Image (cartoon, rainbow, N blue to C red):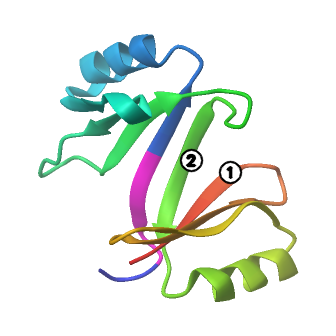
């Protein structure tokens, strides 16, 4: 996977079931609910960006975060902070998959970083 391309889209919704129905109808997404996480994964397809839809709560505000592939999460965080971003979610490891973090760009937009 080359770096700096969209790797995942995360939709956090105040009403996740309604949001799942909306995006399924709008884009024809097929979703697979992981009940223990209250998170629905978008089934892969030739024209589908991988992603999922989860519930907002006290620690996760509603909104959309696009994750971009980067070769090194920590180095990208250092560069992002030097350019005026702030770290929203520090790096953490998704066992067996990779590392991720979330920044707020200078305008406050959430941007995800993903390292395979």
Q: Would you place residue 80 above or below residue 52 in this image? A: below
**Would you say 60 lies left or right of 17 here?**
right
* Displayed quadrant of residue 1: bottom left
Say which of 54 and 2 sits in front. Answer: 54
Q: Residue at x 59, y 18 (%)?
A: 14
* Magenta-drawn segment: 4-9
Per the image, the residue denoted by label 2 is 65
* Displayed quadrant of residue 52: top left
Q: Would you place residue 109 above or below residue 1 in this image? A: above
Per the image, the residue denoted by label 1 is 110
Q: Residue at x 51, y 53 (%)?
A: 66
**Would you say 56 lies left or right of 36 here?**
right
Q: CB atoms at circles 1 and 2 under 8 Å apart?
A: yes
Say which of 62 and 57 sits in front. Answer: 57
Real-space Cα separation, disc 1 to disc 2, in angstroms: 6 Å
Q: Residue at x 84, y 60 (%)?
A: 106
Chain-order first, disc 1 or disc 2: 2
Q: Residue at x 59, y 80 (%)?
A: 73
């Amino acid at each position: 996977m080359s770096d700096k391309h969209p790797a995942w889209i995360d939709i956090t919704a105040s009403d996740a079931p309604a949001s799942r129905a909306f995006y399924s109808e709008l884009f024809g997404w097929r979703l697979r609910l992981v009940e223990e996480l209250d998170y629905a994964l978008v089934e892969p397809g030739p024209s589908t960006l991988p992603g999922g839809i989860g519930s907002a709560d006290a620690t996760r505000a509603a909104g959309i975060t696009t994750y971009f592939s980067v070769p090194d999460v920590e180095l990208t965080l250092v560069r992002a902070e030097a350019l005026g971003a702030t770290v929203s979610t520090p790096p953490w490891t998704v066992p067996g998959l990779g590392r991720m973090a979330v920044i707020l760009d200078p305008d406050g937009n959430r941007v995800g970083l993903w390292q395979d």
